[in-house]
Image (tube, rainbow, N blue to C red):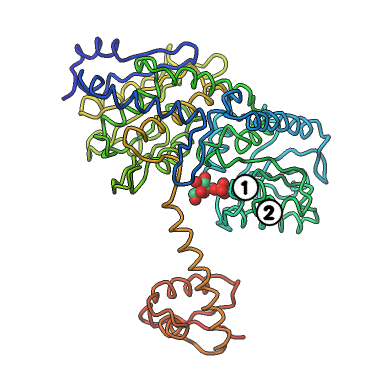
Amino acid sequence: MSFSKTELWPRFQKYYTEFPSLGLAIDLSRMNFSADFLASMKTPIQKALIAMAELEKGGIANPDEKRMVGHYWLRNPALAPTKTIQKEIEDTLASIKEFAAQVHSGAIKGSKGPFKNLLVIGIGGSALGPQFVAHALGHPKTDKMSIFFFDNTDPDGMDKVLAELNGQLGETLTVVISKSGGTKETRNGMLEAQVAYERAGLKFPTHAVAVTGSLSELDNYAKNNNWIRRFPMWDWVGGRTSELSAVGLLPAALQGIDIDEMLSGAKACDDITRQTDINQNPSAQLALMWYYIGNGKGTKNMVILPYKDRLEFFSKYSQQLIMESLGKEKDLDGKVVNQGIAVFGNKGSTDQHSYVQQLREGILNFFVTFIEVLKDRDGKSIEVDPNVTSGDYLEGFFLGTRQALYENGRESITLTLQSVTPFSVGLLIALYERAVGLYASLVNINAYHQPGVEAGKKAAAAVIDLQRRILNYLIEKRGHALTSAQIASGIGAHDDFETVFKVCEHMAANPDHGVKKTPAKSPFDATYQRMQ
Ligand SMILES: O=P(O)(O)OC[C@H]1O[C@](O)(CO)[C@@H](O)[C@@H]1O
């Protein structure tokens, strides 16, 4: 059931709410929930808000890991449950600002001069927030440092970044970020960067900084190798909610972004989204809409469409925040529920020329969150048609797409921001963090752990171990051409013929392990050997 054009105006007036102190508005009118839906959710959402209040007071909101969940304290340290935590947050913020000022003034510099570049190495929550913020708020003219990322263990990806930094590593500060300090992708990126500095005749430690948990592998490495500085990451901050800890604030401050404004935006949003009147609480409204559209089971995907290039990374950032938090096999009572909401999106109007065709006419397995930004640019625009600017077109495409989708029964939420600033980016982060927490309560899951990612990590470690055994076997049998099946049998990997085949193919495609492949008619008769 969709509402007609005449019905929509009163509906819009009813479900459009402005939050002037945030520069934010939310419009739920294009979500076709019935009048009783909100009333029927009154008790569960109030329960969720109470659970959130407990969490903010320092309750163990992550029962599996027996951890507090404290990202809300980062922008309001006075809320922290102990004076020690409050002081740690305040001291870290002060040391980030002091460090950034010293880097900018040249008091701390590289071996070839003041640091002008920043290479951030991290993955997941230790990269996505910094990437989102750097993209949203950076500007080549005003940035104090140019920012680059290693966010994977892809050698070619790293080579590309290093090629951009060629000849400039002596003026490049590397910030390695890992909460656990043991994430292999990040460790590999750090080792690759270290070698790149050494090959350039530079000492890595005098160009390196770590953000990590105390006594982690990375912490110890940085300490033992006399890196310039180490900034803390606490166990009560989750990776995907760490943007407003040193993880996000250090790169942002170094880039020259106003981190106080980011924190103010998040705090202002927290103040509003703590309200129990859900008509005045945009995070609660988001959580309720997610619940409505997916029947509390995540049956519809969330397509995030910001009409602003600077917010392009928001869908990637919120993808981790939402999917890693909500994608859970079991609920808090141990019942199998397979919860989650799939998130994707890039930006409008670009996506209009990509997948919006399917959104309008194809499978109806999604809802859209439009993000509209009222301010087009700094200063005036040219006219691209008489009395029409490029920004007018962007607004026109947003409104037109929303209408075209709605006419075809495709529902959407619209968030309106006045402009993209450190304040509004901070509030957007806080808005979604709380919406995720509230939704998790509505569907009774733990949003703050990620047991599922361990399985892939363990399996990857087993593959690396298998590769070692294959290589040792090929060395032992040097000069003999063996099929992958013969190798698998030879090392006793009887239940893993396919992985042996894949590992042999990969080794033979690269010069590193001296494995030579001789192709055959069937891929499985190909042979592999070490000549020496
Ligand atoms: O900061 P770390 O410990 O390197 O972890 C990076 C990412 O890896 C994950 O643990 C998932 O594997 C994320 O939750 C986290 O953001």
Q: Position of residue 174 (x, y in %)?
A: 70, 45
Is any atom of residue 124 visible in this view? no
In what element is the residue under mark 1? strand
Badge 2 local density, few (<14 within 10 Å), some, or many (20+)?
many
Query: Left of 139 or right of it: where is 167?
Result: right
- In the displayed structure, 136 sits above or below 177; it is above
Q: Identity of the amino acid at label 2?
A: Ala
Check the picture and name the quadrant holding the N terminus: top left
Check the picture and name the quadrant holding the C terminus: bottom right
| Residue sitting at x 75%, y 59% | 199
| Residue sitting at x 60%, y 23% | 78
Q: Are marks 2 and 1 in contact (CB under 8 Å)?
A: yes
Rendering quarter of residue 510: bottom right
Q: Which residue is mark 2?
A: 193
Query: Left of 383 or right of it: where is 40?
Result: left
Front residue (pair 501, 91):
91
Q: Position of residue 237 (x, y in %)?
A: 55, 38
Q: Which residue is mark 1?
A: 121
Q: Identity of the amino acid at label 1?
A: Ile
